[in-house]
Amino acid sequence: MSLDLKRANSEPITSVDMLVSGFRSAEKPQGHLRLGLEHEKLLFPVGSDAPVPYDGPSGVGALLNRLAPDGYVPFRETPESPVIALQRERGEATISLEPGGQFELSGSPFHTAREAHAENLAHLKQVKAAAGELGLRLVTLGYRPTGTTGTMPWMPKSRYLVMRRTLPERGNLALNMMLMTATGQVSLDWTDEADCVRKTVVVARLSPVMNALYANSPLVDGKPSGYLSFRNRVWDEVDPTRCGYLPAFFDGSFSYRAYVEWAMSAPLLFLRREGQYLHPKLTFRQLLEQGFEGQPPDLADWTDHLSTLFPEVRLKKVVEVRGADCGNAAMTGALGALWRGILYDATALDEAEKLLPKLTYTEHLAFHDTARREGLAGKLGSRELYRLAEEMVGIARRGLLRLDAADAPLLEPLAEVAASKRSPAAVLLEAWEKDPRPETVLSLASV
């Protein structure tokens, strides 16, 4: 189906209540809650820290084309355009590209974390083999440890071409986010509005602890950045209207409508019309009030807009947990198990709500900064982050043992990281200090 046909079939927005109802329509019965993993990887030539362009016999496009015969349907924006994504012929998994060629699996939704992990393992095995044939390797870091945005290629996707122009107007590190970062994410369901609010707020409050467990991006342009998660630091200078945390997460006012009102206040990054990406200088609220070229916005516009918001916890038809740096396969599988155990077991959710003191928005931002700077070596007041991380993993384990014990072993990598008292980035820095070459870090983080 073409983008224009989808738009022709999209319902015009007549009220804010329609947008609120969109979140209500995503509610699922308790027995039908699922989760999905997203795993981005950085691509490098074997033995080099150079970026990988889209074009060429060993480019990103060649890698997509090599994978396509193995059960995928290629996606092109037009019949003449290059392939920019692959959709599984069976299942819902998609391989897509971030702006700088980060190679992403958007996994299928599953009832268990181990199913999602198994899908990611199979994907990594397949992509690693295809990449190896092209002289490429996959690297699991949260930020490219060498190079600058000016040296990076851009993937041939229309959305990225317009965001390349519009997003830097909002923040000095917008291009760094687009081109240099990689993450692991998990998406989860909710049963009703109260359940969505509880889960979203718990994820927001615990995100600094998760960030310390997953901090994996200490180097920038070949030197220590002063942050164990520089990827997380980048988001401070992307666009304050669409990134970070909502104050409503911390003052008891969060709701479907609170998220809608926050989202409507963010400016449009683009507006699709007749196959073109336009950039009217409007917030979504202004678009709803004024229309565009005599027409009201439609639900496809709202879906596009939601996808250009980047808070630490994002709502679409799922709750997206966005605060983790990219890690290896075991750490990514653990991410699904961690949040399934915490959010899908009632007792674990109760325990998670009590793990940390109730911080104000300002206090939480300070805690968040400590976590990304110092990782598990940091403190919240007198409490060490590694101890909080151990307790967080313990809550998830107990939740899984009540819910589905077969998922619990996936937490072992997190338990080991917490017990070591060192974030993954601290291990990378130690190796780099002994041998400060790019290959030192790239080899440690290669799939």
Image (spheres, rainbow, N blue to C red):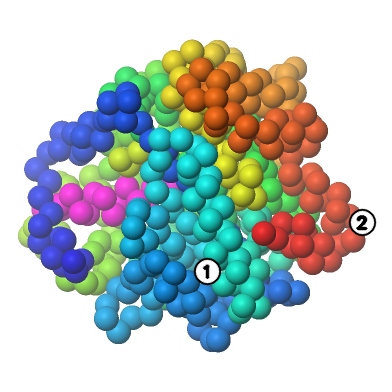
73 in relation to 381, above or below: below
Along the line of sight, the residue nearer the viewer: 410 or 277: 410
Along the line of sight, the residue nearer the viewer: 55 or 119: 119
Quadrant of the snapshot with the C terminus: bottom right
The amino acid type, in three-letter code, at marker 2 is Lys
Tag 1: Cα neighbours inside 10 Å, few (<14), some, or many (≥20)? many
In the image, what residue occupies the spot 23% across and 64% down? 272
Q: Quickly name the residue at label 1.
A: 101
Tag 2: Cα neighbours inside 10 Å, few (<14), some, or many (≥20)? few
Q: How many angstroms separate mark 1 from mark 2 (CA)?
A: 30 Å
**Magenta stretch encompasses residue 48:** no
Q: Position of residue 440 (x, y in %)?
A: 82, 62
Kind of element beneath mark 1: loop
Q: Position of residue 44 (x, y in %)?
A: 65, 71
Q: Position of residue 406 (x, y in %)?
A: 55, 30
Q: Is residue 439 left or right of residue 132?
A: right
Q: Which residues are magenta?
A: 296-311
Q: Is residue 439 left or right of residue 357?
A: right
In the image, what residue occupies the spot 43% across and 53% down? 106
In the image, what residue occupies the spot 38% across and 43% down? 109
Along the line of sight, the residue nearer the viewer: 2 or 165: 2
First of labels 1, 2 by sequence position? 1
In the image, what residue occupies the spot 52% across and 39% down? 114
9 in relation to 215, above or below: below
Kind of element beneath mark 2: helix
Label pair 1/2, CB-CB below 8 angstroms: no
Q: Quickly name the residue at label 2.
A: 434
Q: Position of residue 143 (x, y in %)?
A: 64, 57
> Can the viewer see residue 193?
no
